[in-house]
Image: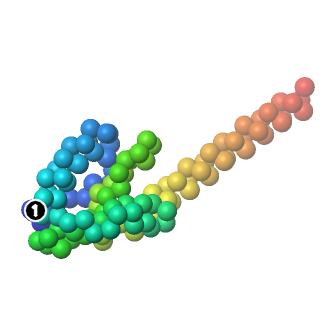
Amino acid sequence: MCSKCFSTNYFIFNSQTDFENFDKELNSKLKNNLTALNCGKSYKEVYFDQYQCLHCMTIWNLSTPDNAWRGFFIDNESISQHIDNIKNDDKKKGLIGLLILIIIVGIIVYLTIIK
C-alpha cells in the first residue's frame, strides 16, 4: 500500500454510489499507477479482478457489487481470510434459516395434531 495506489482495504461497498466513486478513483489510478493483472480469478467460487501497483507492487483484488453481493477491493494478503469469513457467515445464515423453517414446520404439525 502506498500513496500512489490505495492506503486502505474496502471490505464492502455499502451502496452503488460508494462503488461508483471508488470506480472513478480506480480508473484514474489505472492510467499511471496500477496495471491489470488477472481478470476473472476466483477463490472458493468468488470471482474478482486483480490489479498491481507499479510503485509498491501491492496486488489488489476487486469484486464488483451485484445486487445483494456488495463486492470488495482488498489487498492480496487479506483476500483468502476475507472470503473465508464471507463463506462462514453464509453458512451461519443458512443454518439459522433452516432452524427457523424446522420450528415453523414443527408448530404447524403440532397445531394440526391438536385439532
Nearest the eye: 65 or 7: 65
User: Is residue 99 toward the left or the right of residue 12 in the image?
Assistant: right
Element under disc 1:
loop
Percent x, y of residue 78: 32, 67
The residue wearing badge 1 is: 32
Percent x, y of residue 50: 30, 65
Residue at 25 percent of width and 42 percent of height: 20
Residue at 21 percent of width and 43 percent of height: 21
- Quarter holding the N terminus is bottom left
Can residue 85 be seen at all in this image of the molecule?
Answer: no
Percent x, y of residue 71: 36, 51
Nearest the eye: 98 or 25: 25
Residue at 37 percent of width and 60 percent of height: 48
Residue at 72 percent of width and 37 percent of height: 104
User: Is residue 23 toward the left or the right of residue 16 in the image?
Assistant: left
User: Is residue 14 toward the left or the right of residue 99 in the image?
Assistant: left
Residue kind at label 1, given as amino acid type: Asn
Does 76 sit above or below residue 46? below
Nearest the eye: 113 or 8: 8
Pointer 1: residues within 10 angstroms few (<14), some, or many (20+)? few
Quarter occupied by residue 63: bottom left
Nearest the eye: 39 or 65: 39
Percent x, y of residue 98: 66, 47
Task: Return the residue found at the far top.
Answer: 115
- Quarter holding the C terminus is top right
Does 65 sit above or below residue 44? above
